[in-house]
Amino acid sequence: MQIIPVDTRQHERAFLDFPRKLYRNDPNHVVQFDSEIKKSFNRHINPYFTHGDAIRWIALNDRGETVGRIAAFYDTHKDEADYVRSGGCGFFESIDDQQVAFLLFDSAKTWLQKNGYEAMTGPINFGENDTNWGCLVQGFVPQALGMNYNLPYYKELFESYGFHLYYRQLSFHLDLQKPFPERFWKIAEWINHREGYSFRHFDPKQAARFVEDTASIYNQAWSKFRKDFTPMDPASLYDELRKIKSIMDPEMIWYAYHNNEPISFYMFLPDANQIFRHLNGKLHLVNKLRFLNYKRKHTITRARGIVAGVIPKFQNSGVESGIFYQLRQVMDRKPHYKEFELSWVGDFNPKMISIYMATGAIHTKTHHTYSYLFDREQPYQRFMEEAVDESKLPQNILKL
């Protein structure tokens, strides 16, 4: 068995191609575009390299066949976020073999230790948490846009090595063919007609205004959750908008205002994975034409919530239901959409869980974000320990 750093084009090709081999008989898996993975590890493109570093490995068996892969990385901007200095590991794939998995984990651990880190969190992304984040442990259904998918035995590989649960990521699905609960709908109608409140969807012609509103809401809504919170950079949001231009539907991105001040937003995207699953991770000219053909045929029947936010002053005001009220009107005009997958919510955020439940959404998937302490004698702590008292969360949601 060999663990080899990815430092040649041949090694990179093996790193990219391994999932195609591993998941070739799994209809739920969608191969991530090679170009997107390459960008994640391109020092000239990924801004995280300006305050961090990353490395990749592949595992080869005695016949020279690729049997696993992993990446390790760190971000100095996040060094003070946890009670120990934590790096990350991700892009992990492995055959069902502890020896392979453990050697890959050992490689990540050793590299992070050499760089002064005391723990590693995984599987996570070398970037934002809206993609490539968490180990799927429940809900092995077709992979949604941006969500991690893996084989069922991955949970055992992580936990046998010594990773401990850091937090759960809960995903909910909303069946658009069923009516919203009556109480939710009454609140939604009330907030939509309340004086001072207004709702608007994204307009590309006024992108600058909506980018500014998004950053304002996001920074107020999420700054309290982590010590390492980094304010949203409008420039990065423009970059994201360029990336999603081909799949974005402006009528699925909604903002709420109070006296013309932005207070909430929710961004949904058509779940293009329903098309991407046919493209095998390649974005050449033929596949671009195939994408347009599938899109024209309304192949996409699901939308996924990517990110949302409500400023603290208006949390629990019902403004979220007002946005869903607007989305419902849009979906009534686009009946080929059958369901929403709501953006994943951490088990440390019971308020958002309650909002999702109020819509009638059903918990369908759970991912685990794990952490591994290098000093095995050091006491372990969960993420935001004071907020993960599961006895106070809706119990029907957490029964796996």
Image (cartoon, helix red, strand yellow):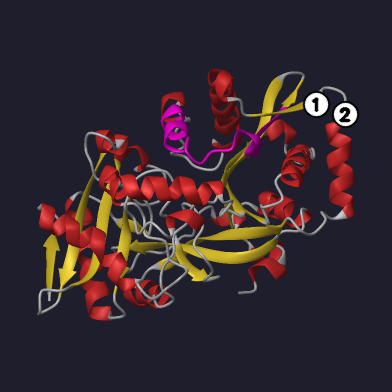
Give the left or right position of residue 201, taking residue 322 as reference: left
Give the extent of the magenta segment.
Answer: 237-256
> In the drawing, what numbered circle is on residue 194?
2
Q: Identify residue type, mark 2.
A: Arg
Q: Residue at x 64, y 69 (%)?
A: 398
Mark 2 residue element? loop
In the image, residue 96 sits, relative to residue 11, either above or below, namely below
Where is residue 348 drawn, in percent x and y? 59, 54
Q: Residue at x 34, y 37 (%)?
A: 77
Q: Residue at x 47, y 68 (%)?
A: 28
Mark 1 residue element? strand
Give the left or right position of residue 337, taking residue 75 as reference: right
Where is residue 72 drawn, in percent x and y? 26, 54
Give the left or right position of residue 160, taking residue 250 as reference: left
* 250 part of magenta stretch: yes
Number of disc labels: 2
Where is residue 298 drawn, in percent x and y? 59, 51
Where is residue 384 drawn, in percent x and y? 53, 52
Neighbours of disc 2 within 10 Å: few (<14), some (14-19), many (20+): few
Question: In the depicted view, which residue is nearer to us: 72 or 234?
Answer: 234
Quarter of the picture holding the C terminus: bottom right
Which quadrant of the structure image shows residue 23? Answer: bottom left
Which quadrant of the structure image shows residue 75? Answer: top left
Q: Identify residue type, mark 1.
A: Tyr
Task: Report the residue marked by disc 1.
Answer: 197
Circles 1 and 2 in contact, beta carbons < 8 Å: yes
